Image: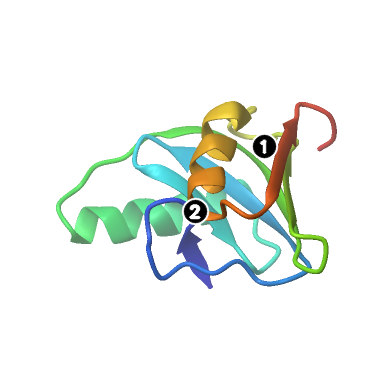
């Protein structure tokens, strides 16, 4: 499953899941499968092109969701695309999940 974390009003993060994610100029996208960042971006790019949009990958990382504790943590980087600006992603996640503690760190892979 590929989801637009911030931009899709129907997105619901899998509880207690860790996902790889990429940030594009159109939003942050995460895959519940263990895909490489390049695979996520290829799928996002193809879907966006079908809708008439062009997008650029701005970096990657991971998203950890702990539903019981109401916590989401964004961290790490993509080997192929580098580190996304996690501060931007977390601000958008906070807007989508206002009752969650949303944090980020540059630590980890």
- Disc marking residue 59: none
x 47%, y 67%: residue:
11
Secondary element at image label 2: helix
From what the image shows, is residue 92 above or below residue 67? Answer: above
Q: Nearer the viewer, residue 9 or 36?
A: 9
Q: CA distance from mark 2 to mark 1?
A: 24 Å
Q: Residue 47 lies in what quarter of the image?
A: bottom left
Secondary element at image label 1: loop
Q: Nearer the viewer, residue 92 or 18?
A: 92
Position of the C terminus, as image quadrant, is top right
The residue at which mark 2 appears reads as 96
x 66%, y 71%: residue:
14
Q: Position of residue 2 (x, y in %)?
A: 50, 66
x 31%, y 40%: residue:
55
- Disc marking residue 78: 1
From what the image shows, is residue 66 above or below residue 60? Answer: below
Answer with left or right where residue 50 lies relative to residue 26.
left
Q: How many marks?
A: 2
Q: Report crowding for label 1: few under 14, some 14 to 19, many 20 or more residues within 10 A (C-alpha).
A: some
Q: Position of residue 106 (x, y in %)?
A: 76, 26
């Amino acid at each position: 499953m590929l989801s637009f974390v911030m931009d899709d009003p129907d997105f619901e993060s899998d509880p207690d899941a860790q996902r790889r994610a990429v940030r594009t100029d159109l939003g942050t996208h995460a895959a519940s499968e263990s895909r490489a960042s390049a695979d996520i971006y290829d799928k996002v790019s193809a879907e966006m092109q079908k809708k008439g949009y062009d997008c650029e990958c701005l970096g990657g990382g991971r998203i950890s969701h702990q539903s019981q504790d109401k916590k989401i943590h964004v961290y790490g980087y993509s080997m192929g695309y580098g580190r996304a600006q996690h501060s931007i992603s977390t601000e958008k996640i906070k807007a989508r999940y206002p009752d969650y503690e949303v944090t980020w760190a540059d630590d980890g892979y």
